[in-house]
Image (cartoon, grey):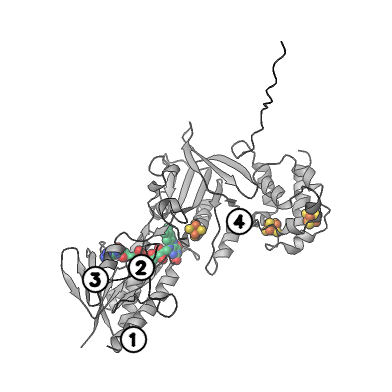
Amino acid sequence: MKRRVVIIGGGVAGMQTALRLHAAGIGSVILEKDSATGGKLRDWHKLFPTFTPASEVLDPLRRAVGAAGIEVRTGAEVVGLDGRGAVLADGTRIDGDAVVVATGFTLFDARIKEEYGYGIYDNVLTSADVERMLNEGTLSMKNGDRPRRIAFLHCVGSRDEKVCQRHCSRVCCVTGVKQAMELKERFPEADVFNFYMDIRMFGSGYEEMYREAQVRHNVHFVRGRISEAAPTIDGRIQIKAEDTLTGRPLRMSVDMLILLVGMRANDDNRRLADSASLTLAPSGFVQPADPFLHSVESGAEGIFCVGTVTAPKNVGETLAEAAAAADAVADYLKNR
Amino acid sequence: MAAINWGYGISKPRAIDIDRNNLRRSDEILHEMPELQSCIGCGSCTAVCTAGNLTEFNFRKVHTLVRRGEYEGAYELMNRCMLCGKCRLVCPRGINTRGVVMLIKRKLGDF
Ligand SMILES: Cc1cc2nc3c(=O)[nH]c(=O)nc-3n(C[C@H](O)[C@H](O)[C@H](O)COP(=O)(O)OP(=O)(O)OC[C@H]3O[C@@H](n4cnc5c(N)ncnc54)[C@H](O)[C@@H]3O)c2cc1C
Ligand code: SF4
Ligand code: SF4
Ligand code: SF4
């Protein structure tokens, strides 16, 4: 009898897991709460470190899912699960032989860091806004002017006890470097400043990008956290920080302040975990059985986890992990 | 009646004010030597510098301040450099640090 795996979440993690299972002769159903598959990549413009359009990753995945005849149910929000299936918000139960949790992450809500004025002042944006505006070709100041000075702030909603997010989101440093380069290309006359706490360039080619942003695009990197943003009389944004490498306070007004928002755990991780005795890490992300030999197993029988539901990851790591998850599921089904 | 001296004075503001500073000169320096912008603030240059070990000269700090448009005193401080080149041997970004000293002195000499 053909086995069927229930995959919760239709982002890159869920789709790639379904495809690798299909290649191993195992069927699956993808349950996606949104109206379409793709997850966060639907909103991203170009992906670091190669500036590959996000659609060049998403489209082939979606086409392959279609070609393989994998069942996709959109508008299907999962509210509970166990090792033999999932329960949707409307009470329907979807049965299977194993379950893969691929529900991803949630963007930090920048309004919580009120001192930066997101949602209060025009021209305070998040990195996610910038991706969307680049996609739509609408990136400019609110009044349509070209910005002459732009500041990026790293670690917004990450590494911050004040908002209960202790972890590093990993992808925001390189996103900040990528967007600084994209903005310099769009607005060459603008001065761009990145305010950082530490620069974390963990991936292949990332440090090289950082260096290129410095040398080729003349992006100014200032080590220090912006303490607050305030409006000026002429509608610009006044920011303050310490330039910690010179030991002096520093201030300036900018036309655009871009907050590099972090990746945080989904709010419904708690509910999903309670329904199936999964363990959550202190960060709220799902904790795999162990970080080495069982990194895609949840520890609960028949339940696997893949992608950013367990920790911040980039697209490449997520896709590679999906192959590992499919492999672990296939192993599990063989031995049952 | 003579004014009473309360012992207060007016302190000079210490903040780096990018709105007031003129970044164009620093742009010129970075345009001639873009590699200077790749500094990661590691401090190796200052650690090996004999002048920095004996005087208040801190090469990393001076060129960082210059890049923020703080030119005052930079020329005089750079004069303490003996151009020995030890800093260039250790800089992990491969910056021609001696060249930086010469360039900053040339650009800010008439400051
Ligand atoms: C600002 C920003 C820029 C980034 N840029 C890059 C980049 O340039 N390059 C790169 O490599 N990485 C980048 N990343 C990281 C990238 O977004 C992630 O690696 C990727 O989205 C992870 O995919 P995922 O499938 O694990 O999660 P997601 O993309 O979050 O997908 C999860 C899916 O699950 C669905 N779902 C959630 N809960 C439920 C539920 N209860 N029931 C049913 N469905 C559910 C969601 O609707 C979503 O479709 C960036 C991240 C951020 C924050
Ligand atoms: S990746 Fe960089 S910006 Fe993001 S949380 Fe970590 S240190 Fe901060
Ligand atoms: S070249 Fe100048 S700055 Fe460099 S180590 Fe020698 S004295 Fe110090
Ligand atoms: S050694 Fe090079 S990278 Fe390190 S602080 Fe000095 S100039 Fe910067």
At 43% across and 80% down in the image, what residue appears? Answer: A293
- Left-right relation of A117 to B86: left
Mark 1 vs mark 4: which is more N-terminal? Answer: 4
Q: Mark 3 lies on which chain?
A: A
Q: Does the residue labelled 3 lie within 8 Å of ligand 1?
A: no
Q: Is mark 2 on a helix, strand or loop?
A: loop
Q: Which amino acid does label 4 sit on?
A: Gln
- Callout 4–callout 3 Cβ contact below 8 Å: no
**Closer to the camera: disc 2 or disc 1?**
2
Task: Using the image, tell me which numbered label, if any, was put on residue A214.
Answer: 4
Q: What residue sits right under mark 3 in the picture? A: A81
Mark 1 vs mark 3: which is more N-terminal? Answer: 3
User: How far apart are the two marked residues, 4 and 2, measured between alpha carbons?
Assistant: 37 Å
User: How far apart are the two marked residues, 4 and 3, measured between alpha carbons?
Assistant: 48 Å
Q: Do labels 2 and 1 share a chain?
A: yes
User: How far apart are the two marked residues, 2 and 1, measured between alpha carbons?
Assistant: 22 Å
Q: Which chain carries label 2?
A: A
- Left-right relation of A94 to A57: left
Q: Is mark 1 on a helix, strand or loop?
A: helix
Q: What element carries label 4?
A: helix
Q: Which chain carries label 1?
A: A
Q: Which amino acid does label 1 sit on?
A: Asp
User: How far apart are the two marked residues, 3 and 2, measured between alpha carbons?
Assistant: 14 Å
Q: What residue sits right under mark 1 in the picture? A: A331
- Residue A165 placed where, x, y %? 42, 56
Judging depth in this view, the residue of B13 and B79 nearest the camera is B13
**Closer to the camera: disc 1 or disc 3?**
3
User: How far apart are the two marked residues, 1 and 3, measured between alpha carbons?
Assistant: 21 Å
